[in-house]
Image: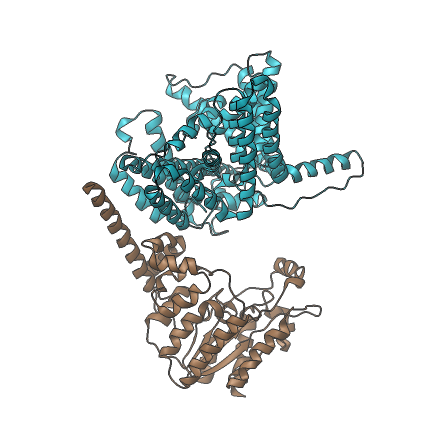
Chain colours: A brown, B cyan
Amino acid sequence: MKTTIKYVLAVALVLGVFQYSITYLMKTIKTHEVGKINRILFSDEKFDITFWGSSTTQNHFNDSLIGAQLNKKAFNFGINGTSIDQYQGLLNHYLDRADSGEIVVIGLDIHGLVKRKALYQSYYYIHTLSNPYLFQALKNIDFGYVWKSEFVPFYKLTQYGKHNLTVIKKELVKKPKLPKFGFYPQFKSWQSKKEARQDGEIALDSAYANVQVITNLNQIIDKGLKKGIQFIIVATPLFRNVDRKVKGIETFEKSIFALEQKGVKVFNFINHKICMEKDLFYNNTHLNNTGANLFSELFFEKIIE
Amino acid sequence: MLFNSFEFLLFFLLSLATYAVTPKKFRWLQLLIFSYGFYMWWNPKYILLIVVSTLIDYWCSLQMGKLPKVKRKPFLWLSILSNLGILFAFKYFNFFADAAQNISTFLNISYSKPFFEVLLPMGISFYTFQTMSFSIDVYNDKIKPEKHLGIFALYVSYFPQLVAGPIERASHLLPQIKNFHAIHWSNISIGFRWIILGLIKKVVIADRLALYTDSVYNNPSNFGALTLVLATMFFAFQIYCDFSGYSDIAVGVARFFNVKLMENFKMPYFSTSISEFWKRWHISLSTWFRDYVYIPLGGNRTVKWKWYYNLFVTFLISGLWHGANWTFVIWGALHGIFLILAIVFNQKGEEKNTSTFKYLIKNIWVFMLVLLGWVFFRANSVNEGFYIVKTIVSSSWSISQIFTPIGSNNVYNLDLMLSCFWILGLLFFEAAYFFNWNRFKIANKPAMISIGVIIIFLFGVFESKQFIYFQF
């Protein structure tokens, strides 16, 4: 029995060391989307204007360009695949340290108000679960996963994988500096295969406006407004050829315009003329680099207005 | 509920704890509740099928027990037909409806295909075969009917082996589960080793190999000949580790309750003939087919052509048992043909004292034949299976091809590297036992078990992948 206990303790020690090491290393990542998460959670850096949302924020808002034009310190915190439902914990945490007068821009594409059924790239969030905001937000999407990751001994270790190791390896080998901007331009042209597939699925193309997600967004905005933070909601461009119909788009637009009553600015680019320019997109919801730069200019003009 | 899930760990610990505190005379009920709960976790409705199958076979076996053998036949047929009926309705109906449609189109006969939209009940092929073997054994006076309905129901639904075997015979399992021994430390220790071994096979090896295999087999036309060869070799080890891993965990879990399930795999890839392969692969199923299909058909005690026919039919049915798809039928037919050819050419297997060179040649040859079968077993359709074989045979091979899946569908260099490493490790580990290299036998050393646990945590793929044989 004594021998067994010794072995159990030895195994637990080895696993504990590995788990702690990987968690520690994940927290030190500066680049990649993990770097953005870390910057929000483990840094006190101040910005004048920040951009929040999924890939349609990450790939559309050129923070360097907008920051230079506005003469403000800007950073794009957009994270691929992370709609408001998943990143609300990050935004909530950030608002705690944001100062009055700061501008928070939330980019929403037509899927931006969807209620997620599963966590996207959950392995990039495991090291953050001790943060109460993150834990609460992610728990609402996948309770079992988040609870087990946080409270079951060594469960975290089973969820860290090659994706984490790749990010850690890059960071250790290249030793990069802290990035100044978070805009990820996409140098892509329209992907004809994707277009054909998506055009065939027009009926399935829907905009979403989940009540729970909207309530959560409202709560975050209320919290920020109390601190004197300014919010801008941006409905990001959507490629719309003549026949293209998007189910539920009216409800989506109505939901975001309802936020104007709180004093939030809403910029709607869904029906903007750039949405008809196929050369600016690489798929239905994503602008390429040229499109993103043009869109950033338009966004700047709107702010000046 | 998967054996490699946290939910199962909780379920298992709870079942052990409640078993330990339940008085001996009620332990059948405790285990039955947990076994039904285990199945209902997946889909509560389908427990009815197990209950129906249990009640019919229980009643039929009791009736057979009261009658002389000559009068038992109607009850035997009722049991067999009801089990096969359930299997046909839920697993094969649409397959045969499709086949009928194809034949009618070919013959230019108007026929509108019926479609029965139903979810395939998990493990249906396993528990129906287990209860059928019980009825047949009662009919043949090999065992006495079980009078206690609860214990019989537990035999049918015993959770460690309910959804993917081993398919246990009543003569082996029933006396053990009836004993309801107390939990003993020595059994826990042995059971734990089996579970660790099974988990290594499943989450460390099989699920890692699956990343490469799935990526290639889901789009075979995107890849070159050598990629297809490597993916097929990986699949050979994936399915072995997946299924034998499940069996090992089942053996380990049952061992905690002092029940010794049969060993389902005995290092099959060290075989030197196809017949030896089948003595080492999915032993509980191959012996089932031997005892309840092949021998009743006449076995080998008949004229040669009938012997060949018996072999071929047995393997054809075995292929169909694996799934309602022509790919499985072809896989079964290929193995039938391999065995017949081995008899025709008087091939001898299982020669352990042969020279190493001879052994290797035979072993590699058998492995290649098995690989050919796996191509059809894994292919998404018969056409894709033939396409893969044709590409392997007729296209050029280059080393660079094996790296083409890297980067697609989350397949990383690390996956390829680890896959090769674990396969070599597994072969070395099994070779130590197969060839009796005593120095390298490691399974019983606590230090190695501890390392096994660490390997599972650090190198396991935990994305809730189902065991392949669950679908059968």
Residue B340 placement, left or right of A136 = right
Q: Where is residue B92? Give x, y as percent.
A: 63, 37
On the question of residue B382 being in view, the answer is: no
Q: Is residue B170 above or below residue B49?
A: above
Q: Residue at x 52, y 79 (%)?
A: A233
- Looking at the rendering, which quadrant does residue A283 occupy? bottom right
B346 in relation to A146, above or below: above
Q: Is residue A139 visible?
A: yes
Residue that sits furthest to the bottom in the current view: A305
Name the residue: 54% across, 34% down. Answer: B128
Q: Nearer the viewer, residue B155 or B75?
A: B75
Q: Is residue B294 left or right of residue A17?
A: right
Q: Which residue in the rendered view is the most extreme toward the left? A: A2
Please state the total of marks drawn on the protein image.
0
Task: Please tell me in which quadrant of the rendered image residue B341 appears.
Answer: top right
Task: Residue B313: name its quadrant.
Answer: top right
x and y percent of residue B73 in the render?
60, 22
Residue under the point 50% across and 38% down: B469
Q: Nearer the viewer, residue A9 or B178?
A: B178
Q: Position of residue B154 (x, y in %)?
A: 46, 36
**Along the viewing direction, whichever of A57 and B5 lies nearer the viewer:** B5
In the image, what residue occupies the spot 46% across and 63% down?
A141
The quadrant the C terminus of chain B occupies is top right
Residue B158 location in percent, x, y? Answer: 45, 37
